[in-house]
Amino acid sequence: MFRCFEYTAFLWKAKGRHGTHSPFAYWLVDCVARLPDAPNAFNSNGIQSKKSYRFANKLLRELPQHALKLMDEKNAEKHKDLELVPQIIVINAPLNTSCYQQIMESRFHPDTIIILPQSVYKRNLQALKLLYEDARFHFTADCFYFALLSPRPGQAKQHFYLKLA
């Protein structure tokens, strides 16, 4: 029942195509989220959230030059030093201390987009808010089912509530 109230509050704050003052956020809502579902662009073995998977699939079709990285608890150390190329990183692990530390210690290409799972646990929400406030991520978005982070250094730091899923 409480989740229904949270979703209603999210819809009250969230913006669609109109009301976003960022060309990047508008592009995400207008071009990427409105794409029809199509055959999978990648193997979904690692992604647990269906909404995250669908959005990542659309994003990968729209940005074919980006590499896709799936990060979970098993291979978090393997991605410690990510290549500085444009990528879409889907984090498929609870946002616990080790995952948060992994994100904070990594370097990212300015065009990298990180998709984080949303969680209802208070400790995970606190870590997510710390990532939103991090100075390295100029674009942050809460999409209720998942969150988006991107360095985008040419953009003013701004947080959005977007209707994407």
Image (cartoon, rainbow, N blue to C red):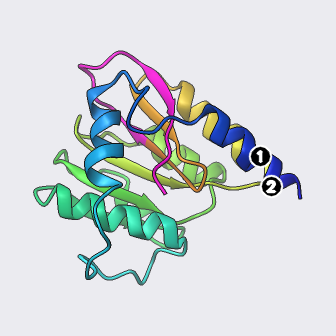
Give the quarter of the image for residue 150.
top left
Give the quarter of the image for residue 125.
top right
Q: Residue furthest front?
A: 18
Question: Does residue 112 appear in the picture of this structure?
Answer: yes
Q: Which residues are magenta?
A: 149-165
The tally of labels here is 2
- Magenta run includes residue 115: no
Circles 2 and 1: CB distance less than 8 Å? yes
Disc 2, SS: helix
Question: Does residue 127 appear in the picture of this structure?
Answer: no
Residue 57's label in the rendered image is none
Disc 1, SS: helix
Q: CA distance from mark 2 to mark 1?
A: 5 Å
Expressed as whole percent of the image width and height from the top left, the position of residue 39 reads 26, 82
Expressed as whole percent of the image width and height from the top left, the position of residue 162 reads 49, 40
User: In the rendered view, does 59 fall on the left or right side of 142?
Assistant: left
Q: Nearer the viewer, residue 103 or 143?
A: 143
Q: Disc 2 designates what residue? A: 3
Q: Disc 1 designates what residue? A: 6
Q: Amino acid at mark 1?
A: Glu
Within 10 angstroms of label 2, few (less than 14), some, or many (20 or more) residues? few
Q: Residue at x 19, y 44 (%)?
A: 84
Expressed as whole percent of the image width and height from the top left, the position of residue 26 reads 32, 35
Q: Amino acid at mark 2?
A: Arg
